[in-house]
């Protein structure tokens, strides 16, 4: 999928608002869904979190984190965190839009920002937060037939998504947010997934 194709599909549909009962006192956070065009195909930039982190250690995630007092907006939070975690220059980011806020079990309310990125230098991981930086073809994570769902009443959701890719398993909030991106871009395929139970 190219930038133009994604932009057309992303802007074609109104955002899907999932019904959610959000708990009070969730702390605001933001992530950057960075879309990087390489060899005429968009890729999503993901990280594997460091093993020593307090929340979601070792899991696959987007660059992002909680809002600091100095951040003027949640978008600024996403840009700051991406710069800190993978050394992505904010000037290399072009905002496309945002998805619905996503509550997680660690008491954060995550705002996902979708953006095209054009890094001018190689990514560099902050070793205190990021064990590895890698990319996944966007078309793979947008293909709902590649999504597995396990039905389980957990926090605010009745199922957990898993998106395998090569030797990795994307799951939890990252897979849930990618699932919502896929359903936004391809709403006609929102009922497609493979059930694990």
Image (spheres, rainbow, N blue to C red):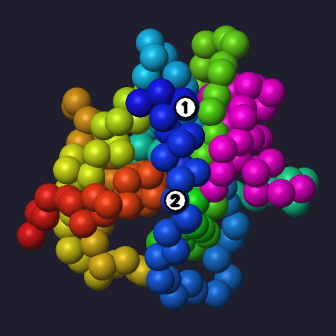
State left or right for residue 126 relative to residue 55. Answer: right
Residue at point 68%, 71% (across, down): 27
Q: Give the range drawn in magenta.
A: 72-98
At which x and y percent is residue 145? Answer: 20, 50
Q: Can residue 52 be seen in this view?
A: no
* Residue underneath mark 2: 13
Residue 93 counted in the magenta span = yes
Residue depicted at x 21% and y 46%: 146
The vertical placement of 180 against 46, above or below, is below
**As rendered, which of 84 and 51 lies closer to the eye?**
84
Q: Earlier in the sequence, mark 2 or mark 1?
A: 1
Neighbor class of circle 1 (other Cα within 10 Å; few <14, some 14-19, many 20+) is few
Helix, strand or loop status at disc 2 = loop
Q: Contact (CB < 8 A) between labels 2 and 1?
A: no
What is the C-alpha distance between the residues marked 2 and 1? 15 Å
Residue 75 % position (x, y): 76, 51
**Placement of 142 over or under 41, stated as above or below:** below
Between 44 and 25, the one lying in front of the other is 44
Residue position marked by numbered label 1 in the rendering? 4
Residue 68 is situated, as x and y percent measured from the top left of the image, at 81, 57
The local secondary structure at tag 1 comes to helix
């Amino acid at each position: 999928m190219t930038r133009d194709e994604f932009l057309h599909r992303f802007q074609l549909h109104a955002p899907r608002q999932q019904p959610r009962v959000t708990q009070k006192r969730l702390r605001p956070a933001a992530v950057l869904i960075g879309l990087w065009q390489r060899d005429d195909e968009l890729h999503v930039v993901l990280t594997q979190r460091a093993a020593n982190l307090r929340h979601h250690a070792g899991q696959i995630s987007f660059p992002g984190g909680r809002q600091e007092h100095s951040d003027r907006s949640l978008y600024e939070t996403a840009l700051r965190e991406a710069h800190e975690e993978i050394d992505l220059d904010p000037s290399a980011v072009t905002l496309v839009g945002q998805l619905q806020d996503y509550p997680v079990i660690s008491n954060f309310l995550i705002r996902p920002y979708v953006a095209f990125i054009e890094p001018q230098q190689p990514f560099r991981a902050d070793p205190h937060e990021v064990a590895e930086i890698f990319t996944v073809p966007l078309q793979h994570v947008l293909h709902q037939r590649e999504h597995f769902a396990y039905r389980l009443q957990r926090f605010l959701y009745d199922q957990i998504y898993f998106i395998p890719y090569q030797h990795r398993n994307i799951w939890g909030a990252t897979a849930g947010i990618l699932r919502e991106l896929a359903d936004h871009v391809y709403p006609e395929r929102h009922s497609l997934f493979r059930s694990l139970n």
